[in-house]
Image (tube, grey):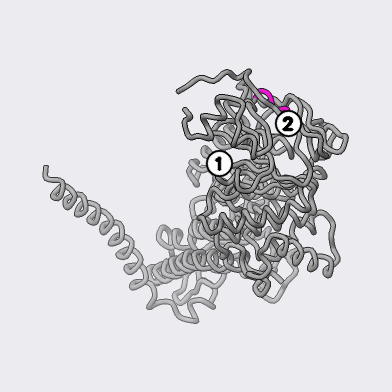
Amino acid sequence: MKKYDLNDTYIASFDNEKAITTKNIQVFYGKDQAFFNGSLAFPRYKITALIGASGSGKSTFLRCLNRMNDDVATVKGDIMYRGLNINSKKINVYELRKHIGMVFQRPNPFAKSINNNITFSLKAHGMKNKKQLRQRVEKSLKDAALWDEVHGELNQSALALSGGQKQRLCIARAIAMQPDILLLDEPASALDPVSTAEVESTLKELKKKYTIIIVTHNMQQASRISDYTAFFYMGHVLEYNTTKNLFTNPHVKATEDYISGNFG
Amino acid sequence: MNPRIANKIAHGVIYTLVAIVIIILIFLISYILVNGLPYVTPHFLSAPSQVMNAGGGIRDQLFNSIYLLILTLIISFPIALGAGIYLSEYGSGKISGLIRTTIEVLSSLPSIIVGLFVYLLFVIRFHIGFSILSGAVALTFFNLPILTRNIEDSFQSVPNLQREAGISLGLSHWKTITGVIFPEAIPGIITGIILSSGRVFGEAAALIYTSGQSAPVVNYADWNPFDAASFLNPMRPAETLAVHIWKLNTEGLVPDAKQISSGSSAILILVILIFNISAHFLGNYLYRHITSSSK
C-alpha cells in the first residue's frame, strides 16, 4: 500500500454563509486516536460529501457533529454552530440533536406504524396537538418524497416498506424535527440502484431547506449530488474543495489516486 | 472416505439422534396422558382432595399452583425487568460481569437447597410459616435467573441501530428504552415469562418446605386476601399440584393414590404444554400487533 504525506493537504475556504464549522477535531477510542485533524466549514443549504476509503474516519467525524460519539469516544476540538461550541459539556445534547438530525447507513425505522415512526419523537418532545402532528407527518413525508406512495397506509407497519421507502421514512422522521442540518451516514449503501436514485433525488430537493452533510464511499454519488467534497484519509482531511474542482483538479496526490481508482 | 458416503453417514447419524429426542418426548407425554386422562373428570377437577378416602379431587392443588405462579411472577417480574434492562442497556465491564456470574450461580443452585434456605430464613426465622408467600419467595429465587437472562436477551435482540435512531432524534436513552426498545422486546419477554412459568408450575422440591404439604379448606367466595379462610390469603399453607403428586407417591394414604397421581400428572403436563404452545402464538401475535398501527 502506498504511503501518502499526511501533511500535504489542501483545504479550500469559501466565503458563503456557514451552517457549522469544525476546528481541530480529534477523536480517541480509549487511548487509540482514530481521528487527527478535522477543520472544515460547511456552507449552508449545500450538500457536502465526505468521501474516503473504509476506516478513513469519515463516519467518525460525521458522528461528532451531533455528538453521537458521546458514550463511545472522546472528542476534542471545537464545533461551532450558531456561535456556540457544541462540543462542550454544557450543551444540552437532546436539544442539539433536534437541530442536527441524522440518517444512518442501514434503514432503521422503528417497529411501529409509518405514522408513529414520525410522531413518536415529536410527541416525546412535547407536541400534543393532533392536527399539528398530522400536518407534520404529511409535510415531512412529502418532503422526503414518500407521501404519494404511503399516504393511504399510514397505519401499516413501517417494517413492510421496501428498503428505499424505509430509508426515505428515516429521512422523513429526521426532518419532521425541523432540523437545520441533516447528517447522512452512507444512506444509500444498503440500497439497490433504483432506491438509491430515489434517495438521491430526495436529497437534492431537501438542500433547498437544509444543510446536508453526507458520508459516502461512492464517488459517483458524491459527484452527482454534492456541491462540496472533503477527502478523508487515515483519520485526516487531506482535501476540501468544491465537488467540481476536487474531481477535475485535485491538488493532493492521495485525492487524485483515490478518485482515479488508483488507490491503495 | 468418499465425500458422498461421509455425508450420507453424517445425515443418518444426525437424523437418528434427533429421532431419539423426539421419541423420548412423545413416549413420555403420551404415556402420562394415556395413563392419566381417563381419571380426569369434572368431579376430579372440582372436588377437594381427601386424606383417607377414595374419590378426592385436585381443585385446591390446581388453584394453589396457579395462584403461587401469579404471586411469583408479581414478585419476580419487576426485579428481573430492572436487572435485565440494566444488564442489556446500562451495564458494562466488571460490575455486569459480576452480576452475570451471580445469576449463573443462582440458576445452578439445586431447588431443594433454595427451598431449605427459604424454609430456614422465612418460614422459621421470620415466623412466616408454611405459606404461599414463602413458596413464592422460593420460586422467585428459582425464577429470577431465568427471567433476567430472558429479558436481557430480549432487549439485546433489538438491533443497536434502533437505539441510535432514538438518540439521534434527541430522545434520552431512557425514553428510547421505554418507547422503542421495550415495545420491540415485549414478544420475547412474554414468551420468556410463559416458558419460565412452565418450569415454576412444575416445581416441587423448592415448595415442600416453603408452601407446605397441606391444602386447608378455603372459601372461594371470600375475596378478601386478609381473611384467614380466603382463597386469596397468601399467608396460608398451600400444597401445589406438583407437591401433591410427590406426596401421593411417597406417603399417600388414599386407596386411589395411583389414579389421582396419574390424573394430576396429566393435568400438569397439559397445562405446561398449553403454556409452551401459547407462548409461541402469543409472541408472534404481539409482534404483529405492536409493529403495525396502534390507533
User: What span is colored magenta in the figure?
Assistant: A36-40
**Distance of mark 2 from mark 1, alpha carbons?**
20 Å
The disc label shown at residue A219, or none = 1
> Residue at coordinates 55% horizontally, 30% vertically from top-left?
A256
Asked if residue A256 can be seen in this view, the reply is yes
Q: Residue at x 52, y 39 (%)?
A: B104
Q: Chain of mark 2?
A: A
Q: Amino acid at mark 2?
A: Leu
Residue B173 lies, in percent from the top left, at 72, 45
Q: Secondary structure at mark 1?
A: helix
Q: Nearer the viewer, residue A170 or B180?
A: A170
- Kindly identify the residue that appears in the image at 17 percent across and 52 percent down: B8
- Please name the predominant secondary structure of the magenta segment in the image: strand
Is residue B36 placed above or below B251 in the rendered structure? below
Q: Amino acid at mark 1?
A: Met
Rendered view: A134 above or below B111: below
Which image quarter holds the N terminus of chain B? top left
Horizontal side of B245 relative to A249 (left or right) equals left
Pick the front one: B293 or B96: B293
Badge 1 crowding class, 10 Å Cα cut-off, few under 14, some 14 to 19, many 20 or more, is some
Tell me, for residue A40, which label it has, or none.
2
> Left of B127 or right of it: where is A264?
left
Residue B138 visible, this orientation: no
